[in-house]
Image (cartoon, rainbow, N blue to C red):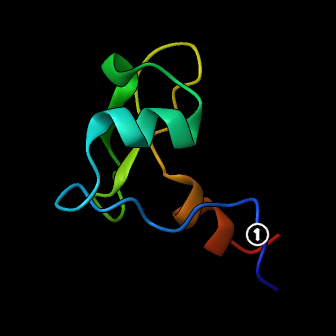
């Protein structure tokens, strides 16, 4: 099942922090690497998630 609301992996080589912040709904200061795939995620701040939405979507329910 593919959830269209879950973004794919945000590659730090092709996605800047501003674009990632808009997609993830956080500040650019909150952007950091996912601990699993090293893609961009809201790693810091109130919405902190050490695992990006793409990796969380792959987890079994």
Residue 13 falls in which quadrant of the image?
Answer: bottom left
Q: Which residue is mark 1?
A: 4
Viewer-nearest residue: 22 or 51 = 22
Question: Eyeballing the image, is 6 above or below 27?
Answer: below
Picture coordinates of residue 26, whole percent (x, y): 52, 24
Which residue is at the far bottom? 1
User: Could you tell me which secondary element the residue under label 1 belongs to?
Assistant: loop
Residue 53 falls in which quadrant of the image?
Answer: bottom right
Residue at point 34% right, 32% down? 18
Picture coordinates of residue 47, whole percent (x, y): 59, 23
Question: Eyeballing the image, is 28 above or below 53?
Answer: above
Is residue 42 visible in this depiction of the protein? no
Picture coordinates of residue 20, whole percent (x, y): 41, 42
Left or right of 32, for residue 47: right
| Position of the C terminus by quadrant | bottom right
Viewer-nearest residue: 19 or 30 = 19
């Amino acid at each position: 099942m593919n959830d269209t609301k879950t973004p794919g992996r945000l590659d730090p080589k092709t996605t800047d922090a501003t674009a990632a912040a808009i997609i993830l709904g956080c500040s650019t200061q909150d952007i950091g690497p996912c601990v699993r795939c090293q893609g961009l995620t809201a790693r810091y701040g109130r919405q902190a998630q050490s695992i990006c939405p793409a990796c969380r979507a792959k987890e079994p329910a």
